[in-house]
């Protein structure tokens, strides 16, 4: 009868065995079987082959009212599901097998005479089914099985044989968060703690399974709270130490890990962290981890311990009087609804440091309120700030960097540095040098550089802090080194060892020096230090940014960056001077108030260092430097003021170590190759000298900035061959190319690319000649001079990101944008809208050089317009230029380009010029701050040579754009490109993060990667913060 059914399933393995089992079943409940088979045979075609058999079994299980029969069927089922691997289990689940088992469980407790064996058998089967059934948890809850299992466990605490399958089932129940809460209410936390035991020689799998279940239960915050109230944090720690001590051969790593996972989940709540600290958890985990460090296989323990310690590290406020910039700049007019008005209207106390908000507890009043100095803002125009500083007159408005005065340069800053030792060089130095200080002849090496001219330019540069000093690198100039600078390979465990050093601050507080050695907020800054043991810092020069330096240990410094003026965050750019160093000593520097949630510093990017002694020896260059570099979330709490109201965020640390090779050196560190406003002015002046009668070069003042600096506008093209009508006509009809850069001050690479562009355009090569004859170039090389001068990272003096003001720039607050936009509007009005508009930027989180363009079709936020995106015919001309660039520029990567216009970018230059001026080829060109992962420069960090080359190649690409089309005429060009480039029409969404998953958890709230033990392990669900998404 029922053999034909089975004979249809030749593919099922162990067929004969199945056959035998079913035959056995038939004997038990023959008639049921027959009826079932008859009804199912008609639907034979639609039913999966094995399923009818399965349904038969299930229905017989449901109808069985006899313990022994039920047990027999269960035995058969168990065997079937064991031999049938995943496939048969799938059928079982899809046919409602799980529900049948739960039903059976209920019957077993209520109707059937209580049978331990039956309960055990059902649980054993459920333990197998659970992990395969996604809805297992819900089914269990709805059928009331949670309590049945719990009760059964309680009754069998001393019976390991019964306990094991039940705990296995419980473990699966708990992966459902609603179940975890419900089980917690019924005493699961306390129950499981009874099973988790100290180390013993005879070890079953019970503690491991119980810990897994407990770990899941404790994910619920109410359960975590229950564990804290029950004193279980101390229990977990004691158990961990016990296992750590006794498991000397590391055979039970999973149990130890299980204990840590429980702890990790408990400390997700504030009370848990408190209990952990009260129980001396930091020291316990620190010590055990230190002992585990040498054994590589114990890494998961060290990593989880480290995660717990990082999260429990008491939150500190940054040691600053206010997080607002130390520089005061009074705006001529403060729009009532603008960010600056908001910034200054905030009441004190909003900036409280709170522990990460984790539950609905009202956060206790923090006594440690910040003293926002409101009086500073009340009608005071920043006079006190000026009074507190060395006045301009005192320092002498003259620039003290002229050679003869170098030694006296730092007269106001206490002991002079290398200058004072002129002539008394250390014995290890090369003989003869030092007697006469000679400035490297960078003018010979660098055609656009001239130290004297630089100083001349500085005199006209107006800074908010009224700088009177010049940094040596800007004075001497930078020559790109000839050696390759590969991306730094990350040392295994580097972040961990740095974090352990940080934790040691708490464990061994007596080792901490905690001495402020530099502080912009103190009137006598730089803080003078005479014992000679501390490094000396300085950042008071154009583009400088370092607010405070705190010596933490003998050779370790915490550094704090200054916010952009009129804001309370946006810091990332740094540029500062270090002196009084010991040769050969490795110093650790920690920039402790970084904002972004990840950094290219974790993927090979080093910082830049410039040594004056090296410069004097003929090597005036910024070089990539720093070892042990990593970037991770630290224990300094971010004020909700700087996060747009989000509480409980932390800062990140960028740490690097560096040593110095010269005695009495003055060294500089920077985020990227500095390029000051004065440097731009010098370069522009030197470009004048390259002018020939064939070149038309004109420098205009676009406008004056808020800070009183001039924003230059450059025009470059070819002089007409003659004054003939034809020639004049040709000149008038040359397409315009409009370029801009450096709206974001921290993106200095954009300036280097722009330097490459301008230098190439002024060159004598045939390509340059053709370019000038083909196009008229309009260039605004620095859209944000004030930001650059004052060491801002992103904003202008108005405290705003200028590349978010293009829709309606304010003439007074955003003059450079207002006037650039006006010019573009005018050009569009007279039918001379540029053929190409490109705004040069730098990208801190990606490698290579790439472009953002504007595609109507790919524009997400316009997708609700009537035409569906598939019927929308789009001109693909905007794709040509990036495509050409990817062919000729080794650093350029087409696959990183994106042509989507996001809503958040609607007020950027690229989008406004595209939409309002109708410029189809409107771009942002982003250059990496780090390096390349493709092309000729793969695995290398980017340098100024490559950046300048990129600027030149951009021009070459324009020429090829012209050649491809062979036409000047706008419309035809567009049509032809569409034909040529049509083949590359694919949507170009670019993922926010393009780096591979990182081994070490940058963020301590993220799950560590080795956590595959837990079934509900989800990949990082960290929501990127606003500042992370900033680009363009
Ligand atoms: Zn930018």
Image (cartoon, rainbow, N blue to C red):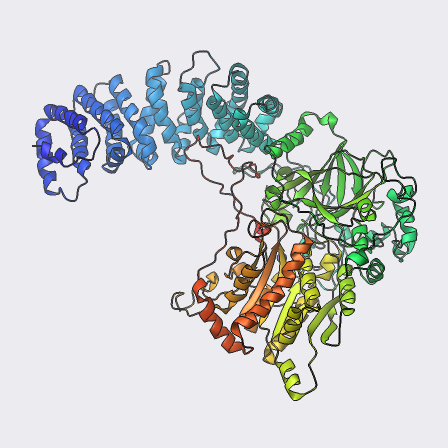
Q: Is residue 472 left or right of residue 276?
A: right
Location of residue 85 with respect to 648 vertically, above or below? above
Residue 547 at x, y = what percent? 75, 46
* Quarter of the figure with the N terminus: top left
Residue closest to the eye, 853 or 10: 10
Most distant residue in the top direction: 201
Q: Is residue 643 left or right of residue 531?
A: left
Residue closest to the eye, 903 or 846: 846
- The answer to whether residue 510 is seen in the rendering is yes
Location of residue 562 with respect to 973 vertically, above or below? above
Residue 826 at x, y = what percent? 63, 77
Q: Residue at x 59, y 25 (%)?
A: 293
The mark tally for this picture is 0
* Quarter of the figure with the C terminus: bottom right
- The answer to whether residue 794 is seen in the rendering is no
Most distant residue in the bottom direction: 725
**Ligand 1 location (quadrant):** bottom right
To which quarter of the image does residue 73 belong?
A: top left
């Amino acid at each position: 009868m029922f053999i034909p059914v089975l004979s249809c399933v030749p593919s099922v393995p162990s067929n004969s065995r199945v056959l035998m089992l079913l035959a056995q079943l038939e004997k038990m409940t023959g008639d049921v079987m027959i009826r079932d088979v008859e009804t199912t045979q008609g639907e034979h075609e639609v039913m999966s082959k094995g399923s009818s058999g399965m349904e038969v079994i299930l229905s017989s299980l449901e109808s069985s009212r006899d313990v022994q029969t039920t047990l027999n069927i269960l035995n058969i089922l168990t065997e079937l599901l064991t031999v049938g691997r995943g496939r048969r289990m799938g059928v079982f689940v899809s046919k409602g097998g799980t529900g049948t088992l739960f039903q059976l469980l209920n019957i077993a407790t209520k109707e059937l005479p209580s049978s331990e064996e039956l309960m055990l058998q059902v649980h054993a089967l459920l333990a197998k089914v659970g992990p395969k059934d996604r809805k297992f948890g819900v089914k269990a809850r709805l059928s009331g099985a949670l309590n049945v299992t719990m009760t059964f466990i309680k009754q069998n605490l001393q019976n390991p044989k019964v306990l094991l399958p039940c705990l296995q089932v419980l473990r699966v129940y708990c992966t459902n968060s609603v179940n975890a809460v419900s089980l917690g209410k019924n005493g699961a936390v306390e129950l499981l703690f009874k099973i988790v035991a100290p180390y013993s020689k005879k070890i079953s799998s019970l503690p491991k399974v119980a810990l897994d279940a407990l770990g899941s239960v404790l994910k619920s915050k109410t359960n975590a709270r229950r564990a804290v109230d029950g004193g279980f944090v101390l229990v977990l720690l004691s158990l961990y130490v016990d296992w750590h001590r006794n498991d000397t051969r590391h055979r039970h790593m999973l149990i130890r890990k299980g204990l840590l996972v429980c702890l990790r989940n408990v400390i997700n709540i504030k009370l848990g962290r408190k209990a952990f600290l009260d129980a001396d958890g930091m020291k316990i985990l620190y010590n055990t981890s230190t002992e585990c460090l040498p054994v590589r296989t114990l890494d998961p323990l060290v990593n989880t311990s480290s995660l717990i310690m990082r999260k429990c590290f008491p939150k500190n406020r940054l040691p600053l009087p206010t997080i607002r910039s130390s520089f005061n700049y009074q705006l001529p007019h403060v729009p009532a609804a603008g960010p600056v008005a908001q910034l200054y209207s905030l009441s004190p106390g909003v900036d409280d440091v709170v522990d990460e908000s984790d539950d609905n507890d009202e956060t206790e009043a923090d006594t440690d309120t910040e003293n926002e100095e409101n009086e500073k803002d009340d009608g005071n125009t920043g006079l006190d700030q000026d009074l507190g500083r060395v006045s301009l007159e005192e320092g002498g408005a003259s620039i003290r960097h002229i050679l003869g005065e170098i030694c006296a340069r730092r007269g106001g800053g206490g002991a002079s540095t290398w200058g004072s030792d002129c002539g008394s060089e250390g014995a290890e130095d090369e003989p003869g040098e030092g007697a006469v200080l000679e400035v490297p002849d960078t003018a010979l090496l660098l055609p656009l550089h001239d130290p004297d001219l630089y100083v001349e330019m500085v005199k006209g540069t107006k800074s908010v802090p009224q700088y009177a000093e010049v940094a040596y690198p800007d004075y001497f100039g930078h020559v790109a080194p000839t050696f390759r600078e590969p991306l730094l390979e990350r040392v295994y465990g580097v972040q961990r060892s740095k974090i352990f050093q940080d934790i040691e601050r708490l464990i061994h507080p007596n080792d901490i020096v905690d001495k402020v050695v530099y502080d912009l907020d103190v009137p006598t800054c730089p803080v003078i230090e005479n014992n000679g043991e501390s490094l000396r810092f300085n950042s008071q020069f154009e583009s400088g940014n370092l607010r405070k330096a705190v010596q933490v240990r003998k050779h370790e410094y915490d550094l704090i960056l200054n916010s952009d003026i009129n804001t309370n965050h946006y810091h990332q750019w740094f540029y500062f001077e270090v002196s009084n160093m010991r040769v050969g000593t490795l110093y650790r520097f920690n920039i402790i108030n970084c904002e972004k949630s990840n950094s290219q510093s974790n993927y090979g990017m080093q910082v830049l260092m410039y040594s004056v002694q090296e410069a004097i020896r003929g090597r005036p260059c910024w070089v990539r430097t720093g070892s042990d570099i990593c970037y991770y979330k630290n224990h300094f709490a971010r004020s909700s003021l700087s996060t747009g109201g989000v509480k409980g965020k932390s800062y990140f640390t960028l740490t690097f170590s560096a040593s110095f090779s010269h005695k009495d050196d003055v060294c500089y560190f920077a985020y990227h190759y500095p390029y000051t406003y004065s440097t731009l002015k010098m370069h522009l002046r030197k470009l004048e000298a390259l002018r020939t009668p064939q070149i038309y070069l004109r420098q205009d003042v676009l406008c004056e900035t808020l800070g009183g600096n001039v924003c230059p506008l450059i025009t470059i093209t070819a002089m007409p061959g003659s004054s003939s009508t034809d020639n004049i006509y040709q000149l008038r009809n040359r397409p315009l190319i409009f370029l801009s850069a450096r709206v974001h001050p921290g993106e200095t690479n954009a300036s280097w690319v722009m330097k490459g562009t301008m230098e190439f355009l002024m060159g004598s090569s045939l390509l340059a000649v053709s370019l000038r004859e083909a196009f008229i170039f309009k260039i605004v090389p620095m859209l944000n001079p004030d930001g650059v001068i004052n060491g801002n990272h992103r904003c202008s003096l108005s405290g705003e990101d200028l590349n978010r003001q293009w829709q309606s720039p304010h003439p007074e607050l955003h003059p450079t944008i207002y006037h650039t936009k006006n010019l573009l509007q005018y050009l569009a009005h007279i039918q001379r809208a540029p053929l190409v508009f490109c705004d040069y930027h730098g990208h801190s989180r990606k490698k290579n050089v790439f472009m953002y363009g504007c595609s109507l079709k790919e524009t997400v936020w316009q997708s609700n317009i009537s035409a569906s995106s598939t019927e929308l015919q789009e001109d693909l001309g905007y794709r040509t230029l990036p495509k050409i660039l990817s062919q000729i520029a080794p650093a350029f990567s087409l696959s990183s380009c994106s042509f989507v216009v996001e809503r958040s970018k609607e007020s950027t230059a690229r989008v406004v010029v595209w939409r309002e001026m109708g410029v189809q080829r409107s771009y942002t060109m982003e250059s990496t701050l780090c390096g390349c992962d493709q092309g000729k420069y793969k695995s290398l960090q980017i340098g100024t040579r490559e950046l300048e080359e990129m600027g030149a190649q951009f021009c070459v690409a324009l020429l090829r754009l012209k050649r491809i089309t062979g036409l000047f005429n706008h419309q035809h060009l567009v049509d032809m490109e569409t034909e040529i480039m049509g083949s590359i029409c694919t949507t170009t969404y670019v993922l926010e993060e393009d780096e591979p998953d990182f081994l070490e958890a940058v963020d301590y709230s993220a799950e560590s990667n080795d956590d595959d033990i837990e079934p509900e392990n989800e990949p990082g669900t960290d929501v990127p913060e606003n500042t992370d998404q900033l680009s363009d």
